Amino acid sequence: MFCGEDGATTHPDTISKWFPRFMEANYLPKIRFHDLRHTHVTLLLKARVDIKTASERVGHASAVMTLDKYGHVLPDQQEAAAAKLDKLIRKS
């Protein structure tokens, strides 16, 4: 949801029309405004933000939904988990 300087809500079409012009004026690649949502989740997961928090930020009904859609960006999680477990075992 977006609002104007007066606090009134902005119609979604306003953003949809503004965004491509903004990207072009700033010499940025052509992407859809919705692609920012995907980038947001992907960056959160790459930064190791927990899946529940990432899911809540984008309004998914469940963390499972987020994992189903974005789980592919987490292939190194198994390696990281094994390394952490190894470190814990070696301390014992």
Image: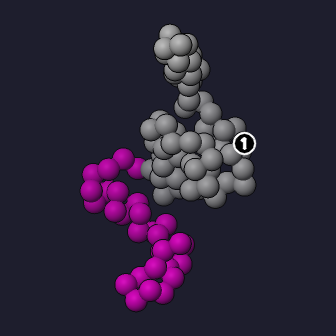
**Where does residue 13 sit, x and y in percent of width and height?**
53, 73
Which one is nearer the viewer's eye here, 27 or 76? Answer: 76
Figure label count: 1
Q: Residue at x 52, y 53 (%)?
A: 37
- Can you name the residue that lies furthest to the left here? 26
Nearer the observer, 92 or 46: 92
Report the residue at 56% width, 56% height from top.
57
Q: Is residue 60 magenta?
A: no
* Image point (36%, 47%), residue name: 29
Q: Residue at x 40, y 89 (%)?
A: 6
Q: Is residue 73 above or below residue 20?
A: above
Horizontal side of 90 relative to 67 (left or right) equals: left
| Image coordinates for residue 33, horizontal then vertical, percent | 48, 58
Q: Is residue 64 toward the left or the right of residue 83 in the image?
A: right
Question: What residue does disc 1 label?
Answer: 64
- On the question of residue 11 being in view, the answer is yes
Any magenta on residue 2?
Answer: yes
Question: Is residue 64 shown above or below 90?
Answer: below
| Residue type, numbered disc 1 | Val
Callout 1 secondary element: helix
Q: Quadrant of residue 68?
A: top right
Q: Position of residue 63 (x, y in %)?
A: 68, 45
Q: Which residues are magenta?
A: 1-30
Q: Residues within 10 Å of mark 1 (few under 14, many from 20)?
A: some
